[in-house]
Image: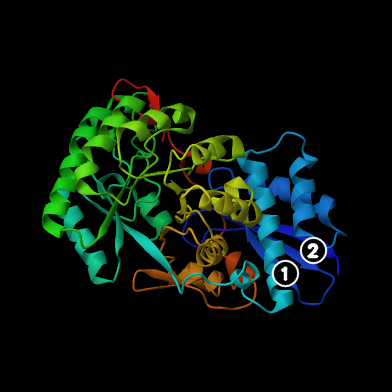
Amino acid sequence: MRITNVRAICTAPEGIALVVVKIETSSPGLYGLGCATFTQRPLTVVTAVEQYLRPFLVGKDPAAIEDIWQSAYVSSYWRSGPVLNNALAGVDGALWDIKGKCANLPLYQLFGGKCRDYAALYAHAAGENVHEVEESVRAYMEQGYGYVRCQTAVPGFATYGARRNVTRWQRSAQGEPGDGNREQADPERDAGEEAHKALEGAWEPMPYTRLVPRLFEHLRNQLGDGVELLHDVHERIPPVQALGLAKELEPYNLFFLEDPLAPEDCGYFRTMRQQTTTPIAMGELFVNQAEYVPLIEGRLIDFIRVHVSDIGGISMARKLAAFCEFYGVRTAWHGPGDVSPVGHAANLHLDLACYNFGVQEQHVFNQAAQDVFPGTPEIRDGALWSNDRPGLGVELDEELAARFPIPETPYGGGWPPIRRADGTVVRP
């Protein structure tokens, strides 16, 4: 059996640009799918797949997953960037999908079998104020969720993950009002050169760091300890303020505090570990081993939060999870709407087979996305369940996918700049 074709397929049933790699083989009807979604730069991934990886792969044995991964990884000489890693991840996932179909087994069986029956999910609760956030958390608890990420608006300022600053375009992209996976400044508001001066559109760290502890004090007082609470800083604040925030949140027993530091500030994690017991999740923006290995080896984080396709796909994620197990670090793979249903299935198979699974981020796909991707993993009672079909268990209706082309979005699909009140760009 040989690889006969490699294609990158773009679709956006929720308004979010998704990229899926399809590998076809010489065995009639046998193909595999893998997620290669890099929402902010999708067409660069398409080029990498079709112009560079396709000629490299056609004619190779699709069973040789490790050899293909290693040889493709070094074929560009310069490596470990998000574009090439996503392209490689799409190929890697498709090869694993083919292997599972050949074995007539769901992928988690090829990884050693289930460690658990399902993957516990965390939902996203948000609101204009602490009372709205509490109401949102209670609603998720009633649906069976035991883990909820909590974000609140900061009056007068742009705020990550809070409903009040989500635009119509973002709501469409996220598929659910208030499910702030990718909170950004309002693209229309920020269109002009002077827009950054508008106080409502500005981001400032001090009002945020003062408000967040009050949010969790309120939630614990009202909800007790019957639910695990999470929060995402999204790397926006200076390191010393991140350290102070982590310490202030200790009394409220967070399940984890996500991305308190930017990747560029990872040197501060050792100080943070010495100063606070708040569990830390990190890694959403990591793309290479040099970023995450020292943090794990130094026991400086508690959850690894990488976007699986950004680090090179399933093969690399399996190795990373095994490495983390030896250091007591649990997995919490990135799983917003800019991971395709194929990518969510890959997350799930890893979740089911990895002993050191922690929690899985949720995204509720709309009906259009589920129609485009039959077999999308099922959400039930606050958990993600496998359909137990061979391989990844997800298919792609290409004819229907073509009806949802990548939309024209502000900034060409890129992440709009977030600015402080004086106009300074801050990390997203």
- The residue that appears at 29% across and 28% down in the rendered structure is 241
**Cβ–Cβ below 8 Å for labels 2 and 1?**
yes
Q: Quadrant of the N terminus?
A: bottom right
Q: Which residue is mark 1?
A: 99
**Among numbered discs 2 and 1, the one appearing first in the sequence:** 2
Residue placed farthest to the top in the image? 422
Picture quadrant of residue 236:
top left
Q: Which mark is residue 62?
A: 2
Tag 1: amino acid? Lys
Viewer can see residue 236: no
Q: Position of residue 364 (x, y in %)?
A: 40, 65
* Figure check: 204 above or below 21: above
Q: Residue at x 72, y 69 (%)?
A: 98
The residue at the far front in this view is: 326
Secondary element type, mark 2: loop
Secondary structure type for disc 1: helix
How many marks the image carries: the answer is 2
Q: What residue is drawn where x is 27% and y is 71%? A: 143
Horizontal relation, residue 257 to residue 343: left or right? left
Near mark 1 (Cα within 10 A), the count class, few <14, some 14-19 or many ≥20, is many
What is the distance, in whole Å, between disc 2 and disc 1 at their CAs?
Answer: 8 Å
Q: Residue at x 17, y 60 (%)?
A: 135
Percent of width and height locating residue 31 = 73, 70
Residue kind at label 2, given as amino acid type: Pro
Quarter the C terminus occupies: top left
